[in-house]
Amino acid sequence: MTKCVSEIAEPAIKRLDDPPRSQETAMEFIFGAVSFALAIWAVYNIVISDATTLAKFAWVVGIVILPIVGFIAWCFLGPNGPFVRKT
């Protein structure tokens, strides 16, 4: 009924010994690089926009904290959204 330490630790040891899955690693890298590039592009466009400083700050914080969700929200609500004051 009781398990010894080697039986509990065995799955973890096997996982560490498995070779990395190169295709999954490459896809994760590509996804991360694309999401990072889109976040940088959105932050750049926010900074050069005519929005108020508070709106710029809020969008940049949102994109830095949640890059993918923040970028999607910025695409739908950002530059032409109802919360941006036109000058």
Image (spheres, helix red, strand yellow):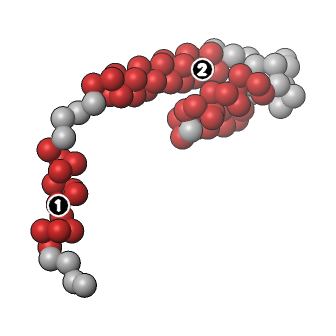
Image check: 68 left or right of 36? right
Q: In the picture, residue 2 is in which quadrant?
A: bottom left
Q: Is residue 2 above or below residue 6?
A: below
> Which residue matches tag 1?
10
**Going 82% across and 25% down the picture, which residue do you hit?**
81
Q: In the picture, residue 42 is in which quadrant?
A: top right
Image check: 85 left or right of 75? right
> Which residue matches tag 2?
42
Q: Is residue 65 above or below residue 51?
A: below
**Going 71% across and 22% down the picture, which residue do you hit?**
75
Which circle, 2 or 1, is nearer the viewer?
Answer: 1
Real-space Cα distance between discs 2 and 1? 46 Å
- Mark found first going from the N terminus, 2 or 1: 1
- Say if residue 27 shows up in the picture: yes
- Mark 2 belongs to which amino acid? Ala
**Residue 86 or 36: which is nearer the viewer?**
36
**Going 67% across and 27% down the picture, which residue do you hit?**
72
**Residue 28 or 45: which is nearer the viewer?**
28
Residue 56 numbered tag: none
- Say if residue 60 shows up in the picture: no
**On-image quarter of the N terminus:** bottom left
In x, y percent, where is residue 12? Answer: 21, 56
Image check: 33 left or right of 79? left
**Residue 64 or 84: which is nearer the viewer?**
64
- Mark 1 belongs to which amino acid? Glu
In x, y percent, where is residue 20? Answer: 23, 33
**Circles 2 and 1: CB atoms closer than 8 Å:** no
Quick one: SS at disc 2?
Answer: helix
In x, y percent, where is residue 67? Answer: 55, 32
The local crowd at label 2, few if under 14, some if 14 to 19, many if 20 or more residues have their Cα within 10 Å, is many
